[in-house]
Amino acid sequence: MTKNLAVKITAIFLFAAFAAILGLTVVGWQYMSVCERYVVPEPGMDGGMYWGLHEFKSLFVPTVIVSPLIMLILMVYLVCVEGHRTGTDEILPNLQDHIPTDLYFGMAIVALVFVVSVGYTAIEDIFSLYYDYADVWSVGVTFSAPQLIWLLPIGAATIMGSALICLAGILTIAARIKLRTFFKNTVIYRIGAGITDVLMNFGGTAKWAVAFLGIQVVNLFLFFW
């Protein structure tokens, strides 16, 4: 199994690219379904979006089936080679693997929400320049040519950014499991280990006193909760 960095980077960006292809295909398919349910736009009415998609309609099902399979293969490959380096069989952590697990995933969730929110807000702002919201969602979304220029790259960038954040989380989970640091490298574990070390240095009476104090603090918290 190769450990070449260039191959890993290529696999990561291919994963993001196929995620964008899958996401845009699903959105395009849904767009056509909405149009066909309400009103099929005349040619040129929506910047050629509907009829342009109609030409590739036969590729929708294969794309929705093949893209996830390719993404799964790429993800399995990346998980298998994660932590490996050329010239050694030892598992080595990446920079992100040094961040405490609970802190890392807290930041990852914030980043994911931020990327999705920015992308969604940008798309809504583009719609608001051309249409009233009630007309857009009650009749069926129609795009103009200026909208398409911005909507496609913004949508692709949002999907790719979200996919890369999720993939990074999966890879760091794989590395932490291989390194056996998934639970040990957490803020909670470090605090608990520190408290345990302090208690071990106390005498018997002091240990019971600290334990009793801890129980009372927990009871107080539960009472007000």
Image (cartoon, grey):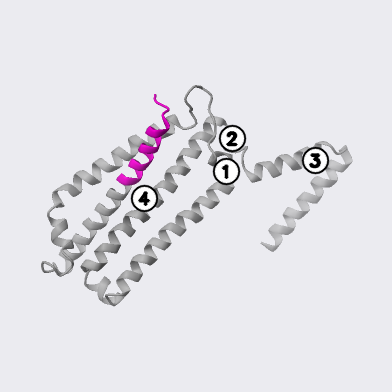
Q: CA distance from mark 3 to mark 2?
A: 22 Å
Numbered disc 1: secondary structure = helix
How packed is label 4: few (under 14 Cα within 10 Å), some, or many (20 or more)?
A: many
Query: What's drawn in magenta, residue-wise?
Result: 1-18
Residue at image point 45% right, 41% down? 170
Q: CA distance from mark 3 to mark 4?
A: 46 Å
Who comes first in sequence, dot 3 or dot 1? 1
Query: Would you identify the image quadrant in which residue 182 lies?
Result: top right
Q: Nearer the viewer, residue 96 or 63?
A: 96
Residue at image point 54% right, 42% down? 96
Q: CA distance from mark 2 to mark 4?
A: 28 Å
Residue 160 circle label: 4
Asked if residue 204 lies in the magenta stretch, the reply is no
How packed is label 1: few (under 14 Cα within 10 Å), some, or many (20 or more)?
A: many
Q: CA distance from mark 1 to mark 2?
A: 9 Å
The residue at which mark 3 appears reads as 198
Residue 81 circle label: none
Residue 181 circle label: 2
